[in-house]
Amino acid sequence: MSKKGLDEFFEEYLTKNNIFVNKKALQSNYHPDHIPHREKQIKDIASILAPALKLEKPSNLFLYGQTGTGKTICIKHIKNKLLKLSEKNNLNLKIIYMNCKLKKVDTEYRLIAQLAREFGKDIPITGLPTNEIYNIFFKVLDLKKIIFILILDEIDELIKKTGDRLLYNLTRINTELHNAQLSIVGISNNALFRDYLDPRVKSSLSEEEIIFPPYNAIQIQDILNQRSKEAFKQGTIKEGVVAKCAAYAAREHGDARRALDLLRVAGEIADRENNSQIELKHIDESEKRIERDRILEIVSTQPKQSQATLFSIIELYYDRKINKNKNPVYAGEVYDQYKDICIKSGLRPLTQRRLSDIVSELDMLGIIQARVLSKGRGGRTREIKLNILSTTKKEVHRILGMALDII
DNA sequence: GTCAATTCACATGAAAGAGACCACGGTCTAGTG
DNA sequence: CTAGACCGTGGTCTCTTTCATGTGAATTGACGA
């Protein structure tokens, strides 16, 4: 593009009849004033947390529900309201929201260190004993009479990694505190998660439980309509578009976040095409693009060994295709192929044990599907299927090849 | 033909090591007045 | 005398290896009808 061309492009971009009014309304961190179809849950949570306003310790609370069922948005909504009230009335109330999936707080040490930081303590990233960190946190928390509500989102991730000692310590903390009181709100999208917990932790943590059922298609439509009114100019959405988004998302266990993403990206696509309306085809396009972006993002940020593993799997897939071999790909073959790839790319090959875990990780990420199966005397192994569209597969193959210095 | 035992090829668990990162206190060293 | 460099110790954290145990159905082989 020549310089003039670029100027014109930007010029045109600016004056173009954009279909968005407020794109933020479709983003997942947007907080609308009203959250439809969650009135009951909000009321329940509010009544459980309300004692905090009288500086009494609220019960520990547990929220369950699959992704995109509004857990996070509801609790944040209530958090904001409570904090506003407490500010207005000058109450000693502190509420901290933490997402345990984030790197910052994914271990016991990091979580407690982060909490201590929230209370104004300067804690090194590492180097101190965990006990020390607990002590620092206890002390600073107990300085004054305060109600502290700790919201731990995706708490299952944290427990999976660190075990339940952390929760045990946190639930017991109140007995050691003289002034402050701590309540925990745990949020999990895995209802089975409680079964991993120590019974003592289980009973004290889930004094109260609230379940967030998935939205149905009609409810998702409602949500989409509400948000799109804010996000788009009037008349930019063709009939049936919202319904289609909702249907897609309802198919995926009523995930509203996904529906919003779908609509937003469809809008972006239409916008880029200089289309003044979002049409049904944009939704299909949008779904593909979201999927593709997600996979490329994951693939390119994986560690080298993981990339080599995935590369081996894709290579095996191509082999199968060339030789018209319909057999599935098995874990043993992947390991052999992987060792070859390591030699080619100068990587030190890992043991089979480790590779087995890497395969599980790729499975968790949804890039592959690995199913354990027993082939009788043929032994036990995993059957591995790629979970990537064929157009994306080529791209993934190319990216990995480059990353591993093979192509 | 039936049924229990065997066998295969990994899966899966537990523990521990390697190496990166970091804090902290003690010691050494060079610069300063 | 002091600030800064350097070192050793002890901690976390992630990735990995090592060793041990588990697993599910095809296969095998003994048994009886």
Image (tube, coloured by chain):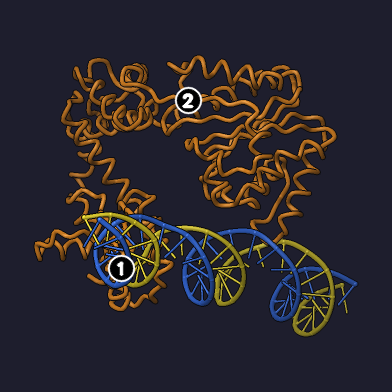
Chain colours: A orange, B yellow, C blue
Image quarter of residue A271: top left
Look at discs 2 and 1 and give the one toward the viewer: 1
Q: Where is residue A128 in the image (x, y as percent from the top left)?
A: 72, 59
Q: Position of residue A310 (x, y in %)?
A: 30, 61
Determine whether A286 is above or below A326 in the image.
Answer: above
Determine whether A287 is above or below A300 in the image.
Answer: above
Identity of the residue drawn at 72% across and 33% down? A182
Identity of the residue drawn at 59% across and 34% down? A186
Chain name for mark 2: A
Q: Which amino acid does label 2 sit on?
A: Phe
Name the foreground residue: A181 vs C29.
C29
Label 2's element? strand
The first of marks 2 and 1 along the sequence is 2
Chain name for mark 1: A
Determine whether A213 is above or below A324 in the image.
Answer: above
Q: Do residues under tags 2 and 1 come within 8 Å of each other at their CB atoms?
A: no
Q: Which amino acid does label 1 sit on?
A: Gly
- The span from disc 2 to disc 1 (Cα, nearest Å) is 42 Å
Do the residues marked 2 and 1 share a common chain? yes
Identity of the residue drawn at 19% across and 31% down? A282
Determine whether C11 is above or below A154 in the image.
Answer: below
Task: Using residue A311 as the reference point, say whether residue A118 is left or right of it.
Answer: right
Task: Using residue A55 as the reference point, say whether residue A195 is left or right of it.
Answer: left
Q: Residue A332 carries which label?
A: 1
Label 1's element? helix
Q: Residue A211 carries which label?
A: none
Within-10-Å neighbours for mark 1: few <14, some 14–19, many 20+: some
Q: Where is residue A344 in the image (x, y as percent from the top left)?
A: 28, 77
Name the foreground residue: A208 vs A158.
A208
Identity of the residue drawn at 47% across and 16% down? A34
Q: Residue at label 2?
A: A212
